[in-house]
Structure formats: C-alpha cells, structure tokens
C-alpha cells in the first residue's frame, strides 16, 4: 500500500505536494495512467473484472468508456440475436446461459480492453510501479524488448 500522505516522512514538503496521485492510497493491483496532453488521470484494476461479470455492459458506462461500450453492445446484440434464432421461448434457460458466458468473457478481457484503448488515446503509465504492473500483465509492451 502506498503512503496516503505521499510525503514519505519528508517534512520539508519539497516533493510534488500538488500531485493528485499522492492523495489516495492505491491497491497493488491497480495501475495509474495519465494523459500528458490533457493531464487526465485514470486509475483502474489490472486483471479480472468482477464488476464486468455482474454488471456487464454497465461497466464501460460507469467509466465513460464509450468505445468499449459500443463494442460490447454490438457483441451482446449479435449473440442475443443468434441465441433467439434457436429458442422456442424468448426467455429460456439457453438465453440466460449465453448471457452468463458472455459475462465470464467480459470478466476476463474487459480491463485489458479498457487499458489498450486508453493507450491509443495517448495515456501512459503515471509511475514506474504502474508501468511494471501493466507490462507484467501484458497490457503494455516493454520498449526494451523491441530494441534487442
């Protein structure tokens, strides 16, 4: 856990007291990314997204991630239409089973989709710990690997 006061017991206050990342503790499996142009900071979990398992298509709405919202909506509609072609009753167990499996898929890949889209928008890891976490989870490619 990071120091919630952010000063590292440095009472001289000579280290970025205005940095918003120093105001809250961040769990070890969360990464912080920042957009250098706009200064926006996003903090999100790296790994499985249990919120995507339970809330599925609402998670990108909560995060204002409209690109992934429309991607997930398209997949949900296509799968729903495909399942409805083989169902006798519209609300049968097959439909709920299909939705459950989609929830498991979103749980496995949503956080990766979210970070990869942020990287395309110009976000970069805010600190070394976040960068190492994203590289170890294979969300981000290490630049030093390409130079070898």
Image: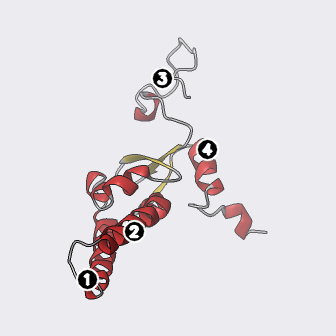
* Residue 65 placement: quadrant: bottom left
Query: In the current view of this chain or complex, which residue is farthest to the top?
Result: 11
Chain-order first, disc 1 or disc 2? 1
Q: CA distance from mark 3 to mark 1?
A: 51 Å
Mark 4, residue position: 128
Asked if marks 2 and 4 touch (Cβ < 8 Å), the reply is: no
Q: Residue at x 43, y 29 (%)?
A: 24
Asked if marks 4 and 3 touch (Cβ < 8 Å), the reply is: no
**Residue 88, x across and y down, in percent:** 23, 83
**Residue 58, x across and y down, in percent:** 27, 57
Looking at the image, can residue 116 be seen? no
148 relative to 35, above or below? below
Q: CA distance from mark 4 to mark 1?
A: 48 Å
Q: Mark number for residue 84? A: 1
Q: Residue at x 45, y 66 (%)?
A: 105
Q: Nearer the viewer, residue 21 or 2?
A: 2
Q: How many marks?
A: 4
Asked if marks 1 and 2 touch (Cβ < 8 Å), the reply is: no
Q: How is the image coloured?
A: secondary structure
Q: CA distance from mark 4 to mark 3?
A: 18 Å
Q: Nearer the viewer, residue 44 or 120?
A: 44
Secondary element under disc 2, as helix, strand or loop, is helix
Mark 3, residue position: 4
Q: Residue at x 66, y 63 (%)?
A: 143
Q: CA distance from mark 1 to mark 2?
A: 15 Å
Instruction: Report crowding for label 1: few under 14, some 14 to 19, many 20 or more residues within 10 A (C-alpha).
Output: some
Q: Mark number for residue 68? A: none
Q: Mark number for residue 102? A: 2
Image position of 31 (left or right of 132): left
**Residue 6, x across and y down, in percent:** 50, 24
In this rendering, the label closer to the viewer, 2 or 4: 2
């Amino acid at each position: 856990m990071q120091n919630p006061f952010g000063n590292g017991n440095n009472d001289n206050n000579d280290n970025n007291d205005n940095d918003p990342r120093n105001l809250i503790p961040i769990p070890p499996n969360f990464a912080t990314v920042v957009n250098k142009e706009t200064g926006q900071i996003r903090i999100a979990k790296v790994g499985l997204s249990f919120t995507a398992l339970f809330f599925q298509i609402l998670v990108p709405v909560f995060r204002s991630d409209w690109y992934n919202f429309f991607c997930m909506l398209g997949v949900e509609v296509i799968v729903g239409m495909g399942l409805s072609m083989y169902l006798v009753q519209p609300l049968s167990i097959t439909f709920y089973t299909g939705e459950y499996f989609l929830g498991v898929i979103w749980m496995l890949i949503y956080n990766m989709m979210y970070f990869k889209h942020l990287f395309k928008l110009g976000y970069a890891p805010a600190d070394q710990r976040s960068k190492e976490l994203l590289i170890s989870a294979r969300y981000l490619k290490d630049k030093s690997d390409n130079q070898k």
